[in-house]
Image (cartoon, helix red, strand yellow):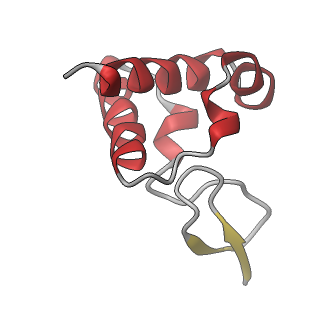
Amino acid sequence: MVYNVCIFCTKVYAANAKGKVCDKCEIILTWKSSMNYLAAVNRVTDIIKAGKLDSKLQNENYSKSNFGARAAQVIMDAIDGSKKP
């Protein structure tokens, strides 16, 4: 068993192989349908509200290059949505 820290929520989790995200945050990187997209946006929004979102992830180019366009889209949409009153 290997223990890692999630890059999104900073939670320590156990994994059988190398990984970057915990089970709850995995949806951010792997969404395929509109329902999964909404779940991913909600997960990032929860992380933002908790104040745990790394400032590097707020850079769209950083997110795209490290996680792909889909994850970057989720992160940017959640950031935009959290700024609204």
- Who's the residue at 38% across and 20% down the image? 33
Q: Is residue 75 above or below residue 48?
A: above
Instruction: Locate residue 36, reporting x and y percent.
Output: 36, 30
Residue in front for this viewpoint, 28 or 50: 50
- Who's the residue at 31% across and 36% down the image? 42
Q: Is residue 62 above or below residue 29?
A: above
Q: How many marks?
A: 0
Residue in front for this viewpoint, 51 or 36: 51
Q: Is residue 38 above or below residue 16?
A: above
Locate residue 12: give its quadrant: bottom right
Residue 1 located left or right of residue 79:
right
Instruction: Locate residue 1, reporting x and y percent.
Output: 72, 84
Q: Is residue 40 above or below residue 9?
A: above
Q: Quadrant of the C terminus?
A: top left
Residue in front for this viewpoint, 38 or 55: 55
Residue 32 located left or right of residue 42:
right
Instruction: Locate residue 14, reporting x and y percent.
Output: 63, 77
- Who's the residue at 52% across and 56% down the image? 9
- Who's the residue at 50% across and 36% down the image? 28
In this view, the residue farthest toward the bottom is 1
Instruction: Locate residue 27, reporting x and y percent.
Output: 47, 40
